[in-house]
Amino acid sequence: MMSKHFVSHDTFVIERNYNALPAKVFAAWSDPEAKGKWFPKADSFDFRVGGREFNQGGPSGGPVFTFDACYQEIVPDERIVYSYTLDMNETRMSVSVTTVEFKEAKGGTKLIYTEQCAFLDGHDTVAQREHGTKIMLDKLGEELLNKSTIGNSHD
């Protein structure tokens, strides 16, 4: 019996204000050590247009998740655009295009995160993805408040 394949498309936008300058928030995305403090640590990280970011992991005894991203555009301190796939074990869950914008705002940075998703065969939903992304962006905010962790060599 053949399984039914289908795609659902969705887009979500999350805005966050951080009490740090755009260069520091950008560094939290572009420096592998800094990013590893709030995002799953990369097994490989090549931050340039055409470069890849790759990580595999998951809960102990649970499924292995694979994040495989390719940077499409980078404008330092202003914008990052990347496409990525997310797999659970051997199953492709989604393909996404993500844009992260860093806008100067009073006292810091307004970050605008936009993800356009193609969810495959019901393996993930926009609600789950948005929820997980909000948790990560909140964790980024906590790291930015900890002045010793991100970007001090560039301040």
Image (cartoon, grey):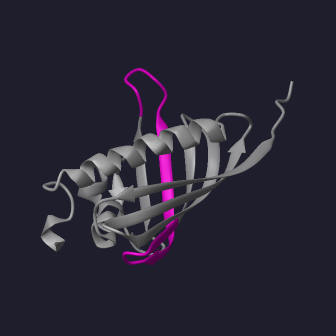
* Image position of 1 with respect to 152: above or below: above
The residue sitting at the right extreme is 1
* Image position of 3 with respect to 146: above or below: above
- Residue 6 lies, in percent from the top left, at 81, 41
The residue sitting at the front extreme is 106
- Residue at the image point whose x is 28% and y is 46% from the top: 142
Q: Nearer the viewer, residue 86 or 103?
A: 103
In the rendered image, the quadrant that contains the C terminus is: bottom left
Q: Nearer the viewer, residue 141 or 92?
A: 141
Query: Is 62 on the left-hand or right-hand side of 40?
Result: right
* Image position of 154 with respect to 69: above or below: below
- Residue at the image point whose x is 30% and y is 72% from the top: 23
Q: Is residue 72 magenta?
A: yes
- Residue at the image point whose x is 30% and y is 67% from the top: 107
- Residue 44 lies, in percent from the top left, at 35, 56
Query: Is 74 on the left-hand or right-hand side of 107?
Result: right
Range of magenta residues: 58-81
Q: Nearer the viewer, residue 93 or 117?
A: 117
In the rendered image, the quadrant that contains the N terminus is: top right
- Residue 16 lies, in percent from the top left, at 44, 55
- Residue 32 lies, in percent from the top left, at 29, 59
The quadrant in which residue 28 appears is bottom left
Q: Is residue 66 magenta?
A: yes
Residue 41 in sight here: no
- Residue at the image point whose x is 37% and y is 66% from the top: 109
Query: Is 99 on the left-hand or right-hand side of 7?
Result: left
